[in-house]
Image (cartoon, rainbow, N blue to C red):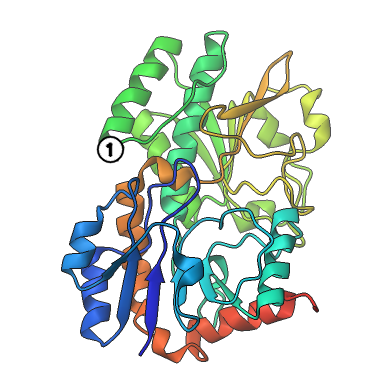
Amino acid sequence: MTHLWIRAESRANEERVGITPEGVAKLVAKGFHVTIEDSATRIMPSAPFVAAGAELAEEGSWPEAPQDAIIFGLKELPEADTPLIHRHIMFGHAYKGQEAGARLLQRFAAGGGALYDLEYLVEENGRRVAAFGYWAGYAGAAVSLFAWAAQKQGGTCPPVSTWPNSESLQTELKAALDRASSERPNAIVIGAMGRVGTGARDLCKQMGVVTTDWDMAETASGGPFPQILEHDLFFNCILAAPGCPVFVPASAKTDLRRLAVIGDIACDPQSEFSPVKVYDLETTWTNPVTRAYDAPPLDVMAIDNLPSLLPLESSEDFAGQLLPHLETLDDLDGGVWGRAFDTYSQHKPEV
């Protein structure tokens, strides 16, 4: 029997979950054994999952789960050096040279477990089967516009926290923009046709922000791209990968520019492939931007769990995309799971 163990998220400000109670009911109906850890912060309470047929476990108890259980979470595991004996489904952020990712892979190699990275859960054509991208783009554009509004008033972006829904976010952001200026800024979106870019563009449209929409054709030259500096905001919606052009070089800090805020929504500053070279560390909910340059100011928004700002809508969307593939977990060697394991095997360090 396939045993799916849904762990509680340990990261601060993380309320999302990758499956709904309705999804659990479907897995149980297929004969899966489902365990869910209790959580005081999960956007969906434990009781509906239990009512759907899941067994309730203590928060953080996944290390003691049966070895054949498949541990399912979203964000990173608690920091530790202990070997990982289980198969884990999660966003590992481990294949692009990240320091924390290298330690994670060592833990898997030492324990004999395996990583099924959600970012690399793909169809045969390489397209991801499930992503939070739309809500990352939506929330990332919103926080970047909050940063622009604060900058126009001589400050920096205040701390952010979850919104109950996108409508409440829109109301708060519109008020902030109205206080800051009688005119809306403009923005350039790279990766505009993808999930992330679509979310960013939708938010901008709702706020009356005109966007210049670039995708593969507009960036095929490889750069440089001086047009980016001619906009008030730049949204990077393209994942860092080998061959990715540099969109904002380090020289942009002192170059003549209109650019005031960068929303690095793809957010991979510690990767050598990062296309934004004016900063090197993610930002946080407490400090949503880093000031890359003072005069004129250049702020970078690089929060790496943006969809968590809208945890209910983003969870429901992602869970709906992923569920058809969770239903095939009884065939881990085939399809999207087999491809994810092959990707892990290519990056697994020798013990």
User: Is 37 in front, or is 252?
Assistant: 37
User: Is 233 in front, or is 76?
Assistant: 76
Residue 331 versus residue 156 in the image, above or below: below
Residue 137, x across and y down, in percent: 47, 45
* Quadrant in the rendering for residue 50: bottom left
Q: Is residue 205 left or right of residue 90?
A: left
* Quadrant in the rendering for residue 187: top right
Q: Residue at x 76, y 62 (%)?
A: 242
The quarter of the image holding the C terminus is bottom right
Task: Inspect this view and state whether residue 201 appears.
Answer: no
User: Is 14 in front, or is 138?
Assistant: 14
The tally of labels here is 1
Residue 16 versus residue 92 in the image, above or below: above
To which residue does mark 1 refer?
164
Q: Give the amino acid type for the residue marked by disc 1 in the picture.
A: Pro
Residue 92, x across and y down, in percent: 60, 62
Residue 178, x across and y down, in percent: 38, 14
Looking at the rendered structure, the secondary structure element under dot 1 is loop
Residue 31, x across and y down, in percent: 26, 87
Q: Residue at x 42, y 52 (%)?
A: 134
Residue 22 versus residue 191 in the image, above or below: below
